[in-house]
Image: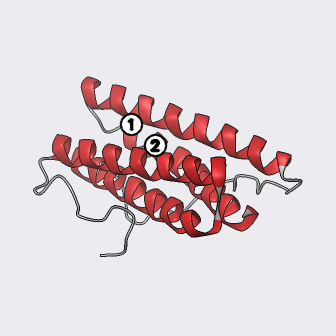
Amino acid sequence: MSEGLSAALAAEHAAIFAYGPIGVHLDAGAEKEARATEAAHRARRDELVLALAGDQATPPPAEPGYALPFPVTDRASALRLAVTIEERTGAVWRAALPVTTGAQRAQSLDALTDCAVRATRWRRIAGVVPTTVPFPGRPG
């Protein structure tokens, strides 16, 4: 169980990092959404640290920096990164589902759902069609 949650924690660390470059390229409304999304990832990170510590596992620390999948230079690339981050983080949570049980499985499903909803919001803000995907967290 701890491996799935450790991978999810690493994904949450990366998501938190990514919202810095995302937020600086957005207008006020989208920037507010980026701040709320980053706060959600921080809260999920904190829950994971506690869950892993409760399982006597050592939570992986955040890296000093993360390589972004592409340069973020404007609003369009910032929105594309937001969608990408939510999809990638959702995929890690989806992978945690089969290796978790009980409350941790519920936490994994809630996180996957949250990432899917946030990715949909970002697609809508970016004007991407379709705004939803049939199986969130599953490789395309």
- Identify residue type, mark 1: Gly
Q: Is residue 74 visible?
A: no
For the residues bearing labels 2 and 1, Cβ distance under 8 angstroms: yes
Q: Position of residue 133 (x, y in %)?
A: 23, 61
Graded by Cα atoms within 10 Å as few (under 14), some (14 to 19) or many (20 or more), the crowding at tag 1 reads many
Task: Indicate the quadrant containing the C terminus: top left, top right, bottom left or bottom right.
Answer: bottom left
Depth order, front residue of 110/82: 110
Residue at 28% x, 31% y: name it. 30
**Left/right of residue 61 with respect to residue 80 in the rendered view:** right
Q: Mark 2 points at which residue?
A: 19
Q: Mark 1 points at which residue?
A: 23
Q: Position of residue 10 (x, y in %)?
A: 64, 58
- Identify residue type, mark 2: Tyr
Marker disc for residue 60: none
Secondary structure, mark 2, is helix
How is the structure coloured here?
secondary structure
